[in-house]
Image: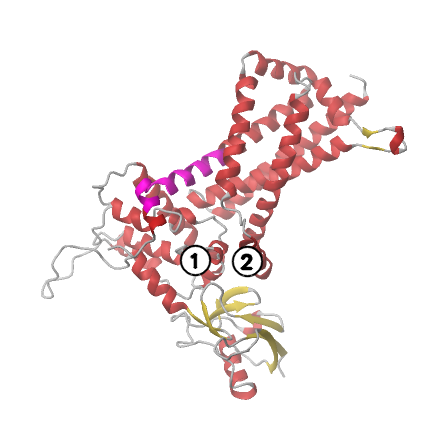
């Protein structure tokens, strides 16, 4: 006989006229190995088929099931109910557009981020599908791989007061993303081009340093180091910037 | 490739694309200088623990070489700059305050709470520093005896208040010491976190250690001043 879990879950469907935001209570018996993802599915199957929440992979890879778990952002699939008290409070992520209940639209936000940071390799080299891939130092590849692990769950953005207040702020995930391209030798962007992307209050210089991103990242990316790295690079670039610029790092 | 931008964004960029960088650097630098000033100030004050003579000779020296005459206005200017530079980070609109407060309470995240404390202590430091500057500068020159008398002074001791007395100044200085060192210690922590030269948890312990030492020195200095005042020095 497991613990009796009581869930308090945010309910609101903006598409239903007159629907009011409220917290709804559900009771569920806990069993061995239960994750929040499993619990939410149980609730939806047995108690309330109208409950909305997102999930795809169940394995902390897709980043869909991020939500505020007892006030802190985290992945439902990665959170064992056993690590939580028996009262569990669930809210949707802030910042992102609320679709309904626990479901938010992170896609539009990240699409905008992709466009603003121009998250692709900028190169003038003509791609030759026959040629061997250009070799990269193992150290460089590993350094790129680390920030690249970001699953775009949005936990860093949700827990960032600056991102909550200012919708033009790129957030840790955005700055981390730029940091990844900064060290990629294949990207031919100049100082000036990178500076234009993140050398501003909307990017690297907007971070206040509250480090909720660093403490709440479900896959434990070294976000403090990444944010500081991009800030230092952009400061260096900005201080010696002439418009021609040259490749940093 | 450019995304559509408004006229204001375009003109800001055109005026100087590096403004945000300069302002961010200036904010960090103003903070570092003020923390440096405060810690040095507290070490100077703590010379009273060694002897009133050392305290006096240091104070006389600062006057003699015009360090006080230049340093005090410069520090006031720096404080004013810092209010504008760092103040722009604080949530000022009601909407922002509500969001910041809600998120802080909801997450219970230590660093975010500490930041909320930084905003609140900033306000207190601003008020307390103004009062402190006024009381000190109107009693210039600064000597052990005048400082001791100020620290130990009670008020209002007026018959119309029924002779009621309260040691306002010592209470003032205890609060000022605590909020000032909190703001300085965590402010420096925040700056170093943002520029990322050190691992933040270790750095946090070091800064907390320094802050505790300086607060302790401050308390001992205050105690010494009250002893001097009590001894009729």
Residue range corresponding to the magenta coloring:
B11-32
Residue lying furthest top in this view?
Answer: B64
Camera-side residue: A10 or A84?
A10
Residue at the image position 34 percent from the left and 46 percent from the top: A199
Q: Which residue is mark 2?
A: B99
> In the structure shown, which secondary structural element does the residue marked by tag 1 occupy?
loop
The colour scheme applied to this rendered structure is: secondary structure
Q: Residue at x 80, y 29 (%)?
A: B154
Share a chain, discs 2 and 1?
Answer: no
**In the image: residue B212, left or right of residue B200:** right
Q: Where in the figure is residue A5, as x and y percent of width and height?
A: 62, 78
> Which quadrant, please, contains the C terminus of chain B?
top right
Q: Residues within 10 Å of mark 2 (few under 14, many from 20)?
A: some
Indicate the chain on which mark 2 is placed: B
The residue that appears at 61% across and 41% down in the rendered structure is B123
Left or right: residue B23 compared with residue B177: left
Can I make out residue A151 in this image?
no
Q: Is residue A188 visible?
A: yes
What secondary structure do most residues of the magenta stretch adopt?
A: helix
At numbered mark 2, what does the secondary structure look like: helix, strand or loop? helix
Q: Where does residue A33 sit, x and y in percent of width and height?
A: 52, 78
Mark drawn on residue B168: none
Q: Position of residue B176 (x, y in %)?
A: 66, 35
Q: Residues within 10 Å of mark 1 (few under 14, many from 20)?
A: few
């Amino acid at each position: 006989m497991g613990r009796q879990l009581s869930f308090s879950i945010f309910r609101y469907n903006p598409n239903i006229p007159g629907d009011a935001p409220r917290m709804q209570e559900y009771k569920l018996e806990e069993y061995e190995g239960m994750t929040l993802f499993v619990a939410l599915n149980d609730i939806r199957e047995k108690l309330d088929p109208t409950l909305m929440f997102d999930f795809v992979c169940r394995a902390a890879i897709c980043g869909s099931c991020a939500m505020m778990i007892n006030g802190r952002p985290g992945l439902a699939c990665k959170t064992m109910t056993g690590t939580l008290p028996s009262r569990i409070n669930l809210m949707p992520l802030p910042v992102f557009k609320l679709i309904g209940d626990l479901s938010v639209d992170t896609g539009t936000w990240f699409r905008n981020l992709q466009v603003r940071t121009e998250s692709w390799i900028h190169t003038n080299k003509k791609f030759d599908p026959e040629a061997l891939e250009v070799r990269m130092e193992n150290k460089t590849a590993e350094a790129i791989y680390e920030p690249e692990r970001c699953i775009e769950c949005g936990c860093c953005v949700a827990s960032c007061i600056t991102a909550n207040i200012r919708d033009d702020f790129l957030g840790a995930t955005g700055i981390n993303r730029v940091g990844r391209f900064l060290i990629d030798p294949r990207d031919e962007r100049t100082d000036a081009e990178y500076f234009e992307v993140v050398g501003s209050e909307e990017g690297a210089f907007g971070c206040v340093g509250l480090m909720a991103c660093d403490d709440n990242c479900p896959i434990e990316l070294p976000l403090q180091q990444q944010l500081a790295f991009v800030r230092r690079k952009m400061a260096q670039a900005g201080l010696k910037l002439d418009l021609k610029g040259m490749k940093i790092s | 490739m450019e995304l559509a931008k408004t006229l204001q964004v375009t003109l800001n960029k055109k005026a100087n694309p590096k403004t945000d960088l300069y302002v961010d650097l200036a904010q960090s630098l103003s903070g570092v200088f003020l923390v440096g000033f405060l810690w040095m100030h507290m070490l100077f004050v703590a010379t009273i623990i060694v002897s009133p003579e050392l305290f006096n000779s240091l104070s006389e020296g600062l006057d003699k070489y015009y360090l006080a005459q230049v340093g005090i206005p410069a520090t006031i200017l720096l404080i004013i700059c810092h209010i504008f530079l760092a103040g722009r980070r604080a949530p000022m609109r009601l909407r922002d305050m509500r969001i910041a407060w809600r998120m802080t309470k909801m997450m219970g995240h230590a660093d975010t709470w500490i930041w909320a404390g930084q905003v609140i202590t900033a306000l207190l430091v601003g008020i307390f520093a103004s009062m402190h500057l006024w009381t000190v500068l109107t009693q210039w020159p600064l000597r052990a005896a005048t400082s001791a008398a100020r620290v130990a002074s009670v008020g209002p001791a007026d018959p119309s208040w029924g002779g009621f007395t309260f040691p306002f100044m010592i209470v003032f200085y205890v609060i000022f010491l605590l909020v000032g060192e909190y703001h300085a210690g965590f402010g420096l922590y925040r700056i170093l976190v943002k520029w990322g030269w050190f691992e933040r948890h270790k750095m946090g312990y070091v800064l907390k250690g320094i802050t505790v030492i300086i607060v302790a020195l401050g308390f001992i200095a205050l105690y010494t001043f009250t002893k001097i005042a009590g001894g009729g020095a």
